């Protein structure tokens, strides 16, 4: 345990005495009763321990309490520190078991502090005015041992959780892969400790950069990882641990379990809109999402649809938020492959060598076909807009100033923009 360890056999000062009795003797004599008090206190005050099976409390938990008392008694007798690196091994193994059982680390540490408190209460119960120095020495030794135990137990717990998390993540990845491939996901779900949902909402996500990602050196990479970590946490919280996701700094895919594919994008749509808004808030970056839903066998098609919706929303400059096919229906349909799309896009081919004209036409459409708004957006004079629109008419045969031409012009812009992205 590093500098806190002492070589085996090193003797410290004599054990403190309270009421004339060495404190290590007081602790050893109280071991059976104190152990029972500790286990009872854990179950009464720490809900996670109250939920443990009785045989676990009577077995591992009781043995760890006994061992901890003996460790402190030895330290009181020989001085604080550890007699050997393996002295805390029973506590380490027990912490790993609590991690495997899903007992929160906070509960484990609460139990240790509660046990130490009960032990100190036992030792100091008979202290009088003349025992002040012994009380201080006893507390110093007990707190040193608590520090050593807390460090060892925390490290062991986190190591065990990391190993479990790796296994769980691998199992969840297998389940996600099975669904994305359209395979039967029953076996993969069982390994992940989940049931295949009746349906899934598929979100294709695009994350903008967080401002901190522009920091030089490792700062930008740290900010990117933080963004992803927060996004995963928010998704997991929303789905109560049932979400499947593959996310990186620029976005990715999320599968959210649902009871009904139709309702998820219908009456429950507000929940998904709120989730995407929270993702943006938690990550500090704009989030654009395409959404689709399907039963498990239809997940591959839902993934393709969600990614197409996302692409449409990005291509046509939709603001951050969540979108379904119905939300981008016209642009979605205009960009489907076919002879019609190709011919619409070809109407604007004469403008490809005139980027200022094409830019003006797009700004004109984006502004709702208003010349003054177009001029403001491009920082040019309205007369310049008029001139450029007349040139568009000459080159393409489409007159942007005629209402009858606007639907065809809008469709041609959509097809051309899609073809150039």
Image (tube, rainbow, N blue to C red):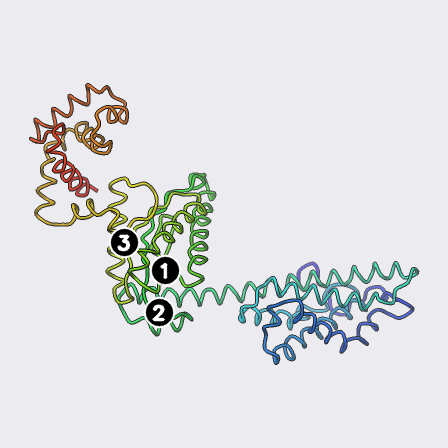
Packing grade of label 2 (10 A; few <14, some 14-19, many >=20) is many
Circles 1 and 3: CB atoms closer than 8 Å: no
Report x, y in % for residue 69: 74, 71
Q: CA distance from mark 2 to mark 1?
A: 11 Å
Q: Secondary structure at mark 3?
A: helix
Percent x, y for residue 292? 28, 56
Q: Residues within 10 Å of mark 3 (few under 14, many from 20)?
A: many
The secondary element bearing badge 1 is classed as strand
- State which quarter of the image contains the C terminus: top left
Residue under pointer 1: 256
Whether residue 342 sits left or right of residue 374 in the image: it is left
Q: Residue furthest front?
A: 267
Count neighbours of disc 1 (C-alpha within 10 A) and say few if under 14, some if 14 to 19, many if 20 or more: many
Q: Point out the tag, 2 or 3, that comes first from the N-terminus.
A: 2
Residue 256 in the image: state x and y as whole percent.
36, 60
**Residue at point 11% right, 33% down?**
405
Residue, disc 3: 306
Q: Is residue 394 rendered to the left or right of residue 193? A: left
Residue 183's quadrant in the figure? bottom left
């Amino acid at each position: 345990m590093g500098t806190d360890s002492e070589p085996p056999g090193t003797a410290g000062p004599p054990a403190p005495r309270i009421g004339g009795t060495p404190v290590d003797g007081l602790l050893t004599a109280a071991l059976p009763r104190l152990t029972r008090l500790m286990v009872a206190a854990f179950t009464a005050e720490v809900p996670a321990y109250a939920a443990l099976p009785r045989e676990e409390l009577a077995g591992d938990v009781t043995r760890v309490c006994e061992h901890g008392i003996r460790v402190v008694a030895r330290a009181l007798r020989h001085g604080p520190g550890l007699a050997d690196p393996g002295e805390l091994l029973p506590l380490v193994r027990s912490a790993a078991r609590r991690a495997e059982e899903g007992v929160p680390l906070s509960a484990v540490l609460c139990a240790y502090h509660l046990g130490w408190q009960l032990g100190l209460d036992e030792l100091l119960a008979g202290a009088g005015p003349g025992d002040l120095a012994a009380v201080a020495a006893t507390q110093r030794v007990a707190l040193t041992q608590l520090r050593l135990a807390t460090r060892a137990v925390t490290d062991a717990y986190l190591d065990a959780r990391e190993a479990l998390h790796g296994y769980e993540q691998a199992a969840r990845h297998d389940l996600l892969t099975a669904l994305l491939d359209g395979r039967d996901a029953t076996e993969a779900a069982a390994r992940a400790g989940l049931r295949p949902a009746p349906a899934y909402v598929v979100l294709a996500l695009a994350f903008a950069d967080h401002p901190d990602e522009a920091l030089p050196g490792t700062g930008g990479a740290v900010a990117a990882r933080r963004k992803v970590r927060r996004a995963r946490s928010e998704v997991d919280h929303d789905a109560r641990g049932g979400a499947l996701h593959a996310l990186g700094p620029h976005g990715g895919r999320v599968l959210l379990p649902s009871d009904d594919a139709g309702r998820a994008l219908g009456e429950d749509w507000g929940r998904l809109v709120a989730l995407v808004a929270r993702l943006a808030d938690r990550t500090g970056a704009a989030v654009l999402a395409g959404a689709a839903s399907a039963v498990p066998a239809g997940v591959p098609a839902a993934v393709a649809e969600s990614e197409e919706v996302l692409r449409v929303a990005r291509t046509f400059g939709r603001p951050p938020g969540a979108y379904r096919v119905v939300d981008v229906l016209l642009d979605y349909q205009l960009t489907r492959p076919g002879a019609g799309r190709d011919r619409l896009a070809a109407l604007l081919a004469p403008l490809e060598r005139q980027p200022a004209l094409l830019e003006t036409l797009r700004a004109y459409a984006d502004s709702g076909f208003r010349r003054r708004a177009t001029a403001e957006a491009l920082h040019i004079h309205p007369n310049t807009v008029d001139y450029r629109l007349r040139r568009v008419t000459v080159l393409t045969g489409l007159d942007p100033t005629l209402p009858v031409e606007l639907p065809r012009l809008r469709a041609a812009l959509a097809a051309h923009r899609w073809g150039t992205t």
